[in-house]
């Protein structure tokens, strides 16, 4: 039930009653257009508002204006985010002086009461799951604090757009009058994730994930967040997870980005980023990474419930505190999820059992099990934008556009800014099978050899590498191009780097390499994919080269020119890839890089 006028129609915010045909009457009887103000207090709130834009798509009667609500510690990033989307902005002082047909906000905080017009409060996160100490009443759920929801004892909004019926009951406990002005519309941000699930393979290709498991750390903001409690966890995961089985990523709450500063955040995470950690962008990209993920390791932030709605494996890394509200959907999800070891056992867990924890959680996951927890936070899936359009156009007194309000699929994430180019390689040889595990070069774990990509890795790693390799580059656009033969380049590398035992060229992205050892002989390496039912999985040729390098150290005699090729098996990332070694032909030796 929402507050209505005596004749059953909702009263408009400026005191004018809607006309009989659902259009707001102007003073002279003409049909009105709508000035819609998007009032953002933080970057996170702005991103929520941007996900609502399809509600007004194609409507030339609507003028979209943005303003920054003052008073937030995170308002600088919000202003920068508004400028990045090239929105038309107006100063707060001007926004407070003029009327609007509709005002949209995603946070009740700030002096929204100074704005003139119908106000719609949209979801700021995945429900009401935590308390922010030191703000407002101090013991209320964020988003339900009477200090913000009922400033001066009056509801701050004309319409509270909520994501689930249970949230109406939560609001009613704070303010029955506010609950009467609520409507369950669903979550527009979730709509974008759901609209993008068929893009998952495309997102994973953009990230370079391949058949690895994409493990995403998610951190909210504040003293109980994952980054505050376990600041070293991103680097520990990036360093200690095997590179050919797992790919780590991190999603950071926009408020934490604002508090830390983008430069400081990147520099703090530099060891993890150098080891292959992906740092997702704060708008759209975080959601694309979540769609691509296999599992999330999470604190009590909203991202976990979005991951649950996508039915991803959830691993709890919240160490307790005062912020998480017992009985909330988030508390239920974390309480029923497998747990990462507490921070005081972190080193032991990572050294001995981290991959076992991840594997056990992934293996135990059953389709639909995690999604059930999100059902308590999200309703109207697939209909959120249409439901919201019904509500806001009713307030505007305008007929909605004829075209449906459709969530826009997320753009693909950017390729990783940093890709590891040097690896500490562990090797186990059993007969003709070689198992390889690659870790970032700066790991403190014992390794068989260091492998480095020449021309990409730093010179310190190149000088220390037992295996140096180079990937062939595709022809460039310039007509001026000089190339090297495989035979010439490998000989030069061994001459220039005394510590190098094997120099190799990756000639095709997936299957063909040529290498030279200190014996001087050239060998051709042909790599076959691993077939699993209807899937064909390819290994990184650089990982295979590490296996061949180690095998040749034990079997130094290469096959003679007239001998049969040698077949070995390379186990990488838990899969076995057949590999064929044979003497390099004169034509293969003349192939170029």
Image (spheres, rainbow, N blue to C red):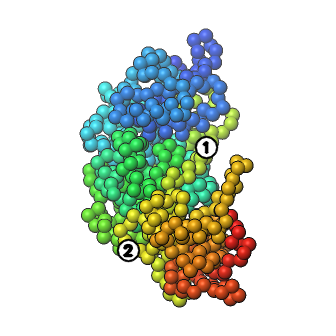
Q: How many marks?
A: 2
Residue 567 on image: x %, y %: 63, 84
Mark 2 or mark 1: name the one nearer the start of the chain. Answer: 1
Residue 237 appearing in the image: yes
- Are the two marked residues, 2 and 1, in contact with CB atoms closer than 8 angstroms? no
Q: Nearer the viewer, residue 389 or 321?
A: 321
Q: Nearer the viewer, residue 363 or 377?
A: 363
When asked about the image quadrant of residue 542, the answer is bottom right
- Disc 1 crowd, CA 10 A, few/some/many (<14, 14-19, 20+): some
Q: Nearer the viewer, mark 2 or mark 1?
A: 2
When asked about the image quadrant of residue 432, the answer is bottom right
Q: Relative to 520, is 51 above or below?
A: above
Q: Is residue 493 left or right of residue 145?
A: right
- Disc 2 crowd, CA 10 A, few/some/many (<14, 14-19, 20+): few
Q: Is residue 269 left or right of residue 347?
A: right
- Looking at the image, which residue is at 45% across and 73% down? 449
Residue at image mark 1: 408
Q: Secondary structure at mark 1?
A: loop
Residue at image mark 2: 446
Residue 320 on image: x %, y %: 28, 56
Residue 84 on image: x %, y %: 52, 34
- Looking at the image, which residue is at 43% across and 65% down? 441
Q: Which mark is residue 217?
A: none
Classify the position of the C terminus by image quarter: bottom right
Q: Secondary structure at mark 2?
A: loop
Q: Relative to 483, is 388 above or below?
A: above
Q: Nearer the viewer, residue 320 or 156?
A: 320
Residue 87 on image: x %, y %: 54, 29
Q: CA distance from mark 2 to mark 1?
A: 48 Å
């Amino acid at each position: 039930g929402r507050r209505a006028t005596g004749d059953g129609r909702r009263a408009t915010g400026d005191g004018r009653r809607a006309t009989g045909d659902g259009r707001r009457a102007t003073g002279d009887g003409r049909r009105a257009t709508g000035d819609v103000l998007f009032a953002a207090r933080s970057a996170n709130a702005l991103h929520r508002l941007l996900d609502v834009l399809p509600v007004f798509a194609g409507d030339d009667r609507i003028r979209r204006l943005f303003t920054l609500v003052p008073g937030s510690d995170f308002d600088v990033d919000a202003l920068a985010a508004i400028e990045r989307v090239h929105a038309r902005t107006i100063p707060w002082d001007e926004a407070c002086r003029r009327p609007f047909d509709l005002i949209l906000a995603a946070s009740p905080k700030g002096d929204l009461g100074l704005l003139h017009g119908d106000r719609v409060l949209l979801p700021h996160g995945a429900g009401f799951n935590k308390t922010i100490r030191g703000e407002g009443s101090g013991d209320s759920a964020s988003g339900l604090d009477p200090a913000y929801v009922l400033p001066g004892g009056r509801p701050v909004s004309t319409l509270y757009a909520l994501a689930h019926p249970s949230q109406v009951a939560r609001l009613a406990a704070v303010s029955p009058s506010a609950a009467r002005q609520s409507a369950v519309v669903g979550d527009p941000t979730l709509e974008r994730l759901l609209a993008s699930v068929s893009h998952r393979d495309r997102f994973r290709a953009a990230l370079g994930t391949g058949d690895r498991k994409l493990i995403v750390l998610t951190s909210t903001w504040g003293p109980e967040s994952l980054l505050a409690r376990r600041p070293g966890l991103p680097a520990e995961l990036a360093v200690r997870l095997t590179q050919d089985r797992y790919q780590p990523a991190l999603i950071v709450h926009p408020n934490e980005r604002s508090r830390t500063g983008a430069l400081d955040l990147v520099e703090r995470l530099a060891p993890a980023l150098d080891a292959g950690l992906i740092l997702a962008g704060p708008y759209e990209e975080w959601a694309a990474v979540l769609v691509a993920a296999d599992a999330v390791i999470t604190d009590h932030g909203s991202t976990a419930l979005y991951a649950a709605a996508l039915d991803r494996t959830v691993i709890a890394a919240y160490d307790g505190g005062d912020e998480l509200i017992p009985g909330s959907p988030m508390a239920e999800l974390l309480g029923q999820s497998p747990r990462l070891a507490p921070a005081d056992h972190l080193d032991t867990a990572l050294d001995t059992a981290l991959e076992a924890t991840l594997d056990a959680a992934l293996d135990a996951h059953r389709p639909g099990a995690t999604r059930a927890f999100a059902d308590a936070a999200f309703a109207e899936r697939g209909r959120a934008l249409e439901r919201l359009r019904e509500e806001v156009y009713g307030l505007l007194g305008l007929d909605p556009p004829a075209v449906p309000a459709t969530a826009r699929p997320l753009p693909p994430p950017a390729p990783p800014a940093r890709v590891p180019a040097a690896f500490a390689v562990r090797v186990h040889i059993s007969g003709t099978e070689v198992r390889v595990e690659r870790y970032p070069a700066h790991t403190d774990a014992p390794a068989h050899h260091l492998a480095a990509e020449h021309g990409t890795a730093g010179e310190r790693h190149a000088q220390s590498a037992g295996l140096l390799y180079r990937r062939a580059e595709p022809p460039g656009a310039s007509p001026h191009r000089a190339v090297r033969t495989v035979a010439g380049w490998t000989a030069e590398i061994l001459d220039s780097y005394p510590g190098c035992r094997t120099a190799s060229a990756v000639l095709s992205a997936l299957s063909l390499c040529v290498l030279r050892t200190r014996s001087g002989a050239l060998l051709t390496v042909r790599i076959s994919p691993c077939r699993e039912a209807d899937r064909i999985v390819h290994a990184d040729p650089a990982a295979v080269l590490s296996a061949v390098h180690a095998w040749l150290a034990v079997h130094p005699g290469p096959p003679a020119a007239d001998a049969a090729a040698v077949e070995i098996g390379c186990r990488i990332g838990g899969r076995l890839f057949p590999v064929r070694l044979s003497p390099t032909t004169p034509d293969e030796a003349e192939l170029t890089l």
